[in-house]
Amino acid sequence: MKPLVAKRSVINCHTTTTGMLRTTVATVICALALTTPFPNTAFAWYYPPKPPPIIPHMSGTSGAAGAGATAGFIGFVAILAGYDLLRRTTCVGDFLYLGGPGFTTPITPASGNVMIPQCPIVKKQPVVRTRG
């Protein structure tokens, strides 16, 4: 059996100098730096495929359309109710000319309007008057 020291000397018989190592590293770095910016087929740009045509779904309606219509109707009714409460509880009058009890018809006990305030009747007078 041979000693381990002899095997080490045989394996490490090739010695490299630091100058040779630096030259090899510099060559590899230069080759990498020079070949990196060159375009190849991996850089080729191609047109993406056209998407398939969209076929509209024609049977039935969406739930969003029904929800939108319902919300619009509820909003319209809420605006009308708010306008009615505004004109009955304040003295603004019927500025949209929609009519109703107290505006186009006389107020009777049968109409059930107890919320109409007693607004002062203002006579329209001209702003600019002549003297004398």
Image (cartoon, grey):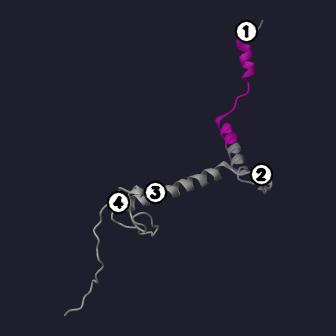
Question: Circle 2 is placed at which residue position?
Answer: 59
Q: Which residue is mark 1?
A: 3
- For residue 123, side relative to residue 18 (left or right): left
Relative to 14, is 39 above or below? Answer: below
Give the magenta-colored segment's residue range.
4-25
Secondary element under disc 3, as helix, strand or loop, is helix
Query: Is mark 1 in CB contact (under 8 Å) with mark 4?
Result: no
Residue under the image location 45 percent in, 69 percent down? 96
Q: Is residue 5 within the magenta segment?
A: yes
Residue 118 position in % (x across, y down): 29, 63
Asked if marks 3 and 1 touch (Cβ < 8 Å), the reply is no
Is 111 displayed left or right of 12 in the figure? left
Name the mark nearer the viewer: 4 or 2: 4
In the displayed structure, would residue 128 be above or below residue 53? Answer: below
Which residue position is annotated with label 3? 81
For the C terminus, give its image quadrant.
Answer: bottom left
Amino acid carrying mark 1 in the image: Pro
> What amino acid is found at the position of numbered circle 4 in the picture?
Ile
Nearest to viewer (mark 1 / mark 2): 2
